[in-house]
Amino acid sequence: SIVLMFCIVVITIPRIVLSTATDIRAYSMFDYLVIPSAELELYDYMEKHVPAGALLVTDPRLGIDLHTPYIPAMVPQRSYISGKDILDSHGQKSENRTKQRDILYGTRDASVVASLLKKTGITYIHLFRELQLAATRSAEFISYVFGTPEASLYQVDTENLDAFLESQK
């Protein structure tokens, strides 16, 4: 029993020392994640004003959200795709949603954006910093809700979305 406890201590201590040294190095070099207060303002707004059942798509340019479920950790709303790397490592299929999200943010064709929003049921769009969707005509069915210098939130207007899709036929 003493030998087992000794082995546990011997195996555990180097990990603790390495972890502590890594943290100290990161803090001394300012190499750690700092969430800007402007970004926190947006998340606070979302928590208070966006319905819990809303479906949010997050800007793929927010790199941390690709690796971890960052946005779902910050707000109670459902996320269309978040933490792709973790999903993939757990065998969850994320390719389709990732591809749709990338098209949504990258295409210049507003009819493609409208069709994707209708198909997926996305109700809110998160934009990183002061950027916009490539499809500028999507402003016909997406309205600005709240923003800071770090991020903006847009809501899909389903009536205008349906009217836009109807006009494209």
Image (cartoon, helix red, strand yellow):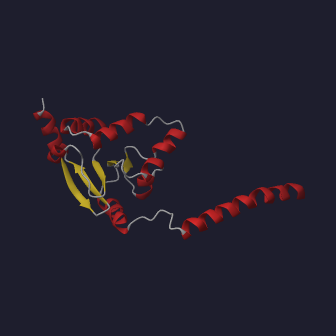
Front-lying residue, 23 or 35: 23
Q: Quadrant of residue 18?
A: bottom right
Instruction: Please name the residue shown 27% across and 55% down the image.
Output: 153
Q: Quadrant of the C terminus?
A: top left
Asked if 114 appears above or below 67 in the picture, the reply is above
Front-lying residue, 60 or 2: 60
Residue 71 position within the rendered picture, expressed as x and y whole percent measured from the top left:
41, 54
Instruction: Please name the residue shown 65% across and 65% down the image.
Output: 21
75 sits to left or right of 10: left
Q: Quadrant of residue 9?
A: bottom right
Instruction: Please name the residue shown 23% across and 45% down the image.
Output: 134
Instruction: Please name the residue shown 38% across and 47% down the image.
Output: 79
Residue 105 position within the rendered picture, expressed as x and y whole percent measured from the top left:
29, 44
Which residue extends farthest left?
A: 167
Residue 8 position within the rendered picture, expressed as x and y whole percent measured from the top left:
80, 56
Q: Is residue 144 visible?
A: yes
Which residue extends farthest top?
A: 169
Residue 72 position within the rendered picture, expressed as x and y whole percent measured from the top left:
42, 53
Which residue extends farthest front?
A: 29
139 sits to left or right of 88: left
Which residue extends farthest bottom?
A: 28
Q: Is residue 1 visible?
A: no
Asked if 15 appears above or below 37 in the picture, the reply is above
23 sits to left or right of 154: right
Q: Quadrant of residue 34?
A: bottom left
Q: Quadrant of the N terminus?
A: bottom right
Q: What is the total number of numbered labels drawn onto the structure image? A: 0
